[in-house]
Image (spheres, grey):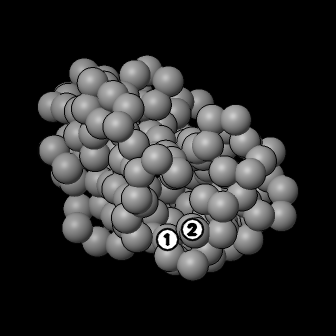
């Protein structure tokens, strides 16, 4: 299984917006929510999702999930329960759910369009895709207060993964 991943950062040294877009930047561009240039640790997206996958590429996404650099305890769970994650493809909302669900277990694309069909989302070349993180200001402030008092780096890094089959040089 192949993974595309993209991160966002909740950093107490910056004012987080109510909305982050991930899969919309590539290496050397700023990671959403920080003053940190993206490296391979933050994303492996070949180009901005706003431009779609490169010519000759496609991906059949079977599931998506999230992961953080911190242990999932009560303050993080409270914030994640109040934070929505929305997957958009070709300017259409494909999925939306609480971040907490993605942190607890991979979520599959389980609707079947017709009998015998494979389930998933087919992302094709040059069609836009992004994941939007919609945060509630009160919950985000509580998370920042927790980060200040309980972490050394004062920031949370959260990765969103799209998992499936990525193909290059598709004719």
Where 168 falls versus 64 (above or below)? above
Label 2 secondary element: helix
> Which residue is at 77% across, 64% downward?
75
Q: Residues within 10 Å of mark 1 (few under 14, many from 20)?
A: many
Does residue 161 appear in the picture of this structure?
no
The tag on residue 140 is 2
* In contact (CB < 8 Å): disc 2 and disc 1: yes
Residue mark closest to the camera, 2 vs 1: 2
Which x, y percent locates residue 164?
53, 40
Residue 17 appears left or right of 163: left
- Where is residue 34, by image quadrant? top left
Residue 155 appears left or right of 85: right
> Which residue is at 15% across, 31% downward?
55
| Residue that label 1 marks | 135
In the image shown, does 143 or 118 lie closer to the viewer?
143
> Which residue is at 56% across, 61% downward?
109
Q: Quadrant of the N terminus?
A: top right
Q: Residues within 10 Å of mark 2 (few under 14, many from 20)?
A: many
> Which residue is at 40% across, 59% downward?
15
């Amino acid at each position: 299984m192949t993974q595309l991943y993209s991160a966002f950062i909740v950093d107490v040294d910056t004012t987080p917006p109510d909305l982050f877009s991930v899969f919309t930047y590539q290496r050397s561009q700023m990671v959403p929510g920080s003053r940190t240039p993206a490296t391979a640790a933050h994303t492996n997206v070949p180009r901005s999702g706003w431009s779609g996958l490169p010519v000759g590429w496609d991906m059949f996404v079977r599931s998506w999930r999230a992961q953080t650099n911190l242990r999932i305890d009560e303050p993080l769970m409270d914030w994640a329960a109040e934070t929505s994650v929305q997957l958009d493809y070709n300017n259409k909302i494909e999925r939306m759910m609480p971040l907490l669900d993605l942190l607890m277990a991979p979520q599959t694309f389980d609707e079947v369009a017709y009998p015998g069909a494979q389930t998933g989302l087919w992302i094709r070349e040059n069609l836009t895709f992004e994941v939007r993180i919609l945060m509630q200001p009160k919950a985000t402030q509580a998370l920042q207060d927790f980060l200040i008092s309980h972490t050394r780096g004062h920031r949370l890094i959260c990765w969103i993964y799209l998992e499936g089959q990525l193909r290059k040089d598709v004719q």
